[in-house]
């Protein structure tokens, strides 16, 4: 735990420079740094240890994670469906189960039009062509 004192230096988020920079401590409340002066732009503002929006980035990262889970869940609901070997000539409907030579077992999750379908594979979604006469 650093020993903060008025006039000391602390790294924090500058609300004007939009960067984590060295600041001079101007006011303390107990052991909490309250007000700082930016050593770069001389702006005085409330002390912020981290840039704003750090939490939002973390949330976005979590939101991207359940992809694999949804694939497993989708596969479970299509367990009794017969998987058809993928061929660009065959026509696949939404929710159809197909077996691709390189990507493995996939589920048609969207019809993109123009003979394109979005298929969810264990490695992620892929766009495939189908119904090509
Ligand atoms: Zn600044």
Image (tube, rainbow, N blue to C red):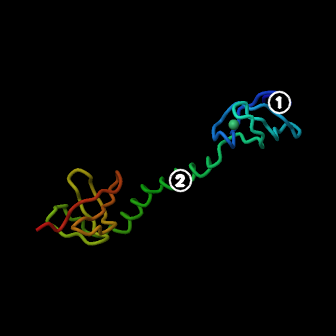
| Lower sequence index among marks 1 and 2 | 1
Task: Please name the residue shown 26% across and 52% down the image.
Answer: 103
Image location of residue 130, percent across then percent down: 19, 65
Residue 81 image-quadrant placement: bottom left
Numbered marks: total: 2
Task: Please name the residue shown 25% across and 63% down the image.
Answer: 98
Q: Is residue 122 above or below residue 109?
A: above
For label 2, the crowd category at 10 Å Cα-Cα, with few meaning under 14, some 14 to 19 and many 20 or more, is few
Observer-side mark, 1 or 2, equals 1
Q: Is residue 105 above or below residue 53?
A: below
According to the image, label 2 marks what residue? Answer: 60
Whole-angstrom CA distance, mark 1 to mark 2, is: 34 Å
Image location of residue 116, percent across then percent down: 24, 65
Q: Nearer the viewer, residue 102 or 128?
A: 128
According to the image, label 1 marks what residue? Answer: 4
Q: Is mark 1 within 8 Å of ligand 1?
A: no
Q: Secondary structure at mark 2?
A: helix
- Quarter of the rendered image showing ligand 1: top right
Q: Quadrant of the C terminus?
A: bottom left
Image location of residue 39, percent across then percent down: 73, 30
Q: Nearer the viewer, residue 19 or 74?
A: 19
């Amino acid at each position: 735990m650093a020993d903060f004192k008025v006039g000391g230096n602390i790294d924090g988020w500058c609300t004007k420079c939009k960067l984590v920079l060295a600041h001079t401590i101007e006011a303390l409340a107990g052991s909490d740094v309250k007000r700082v002066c930016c050593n770069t732009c001389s702006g005085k503002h409330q002390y912020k240890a981290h840039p704003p929006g750090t939490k939002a980035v973390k949330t976005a990262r979590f939101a991207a994670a359940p992809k694999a889970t949804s694939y497993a869940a989708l596969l479970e609901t299509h367990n009794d469906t017969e998987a058809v070997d993928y061929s660009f000539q065959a026509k696949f409907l939404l929710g159809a189960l197909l077996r691709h030579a390189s990507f493995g077992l996939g589920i048609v999750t969207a019809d993109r039009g123009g003979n394109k379908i979005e298929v969810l594979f264990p490695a992620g979604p892929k766009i495939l062509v189908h119904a090509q006469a």
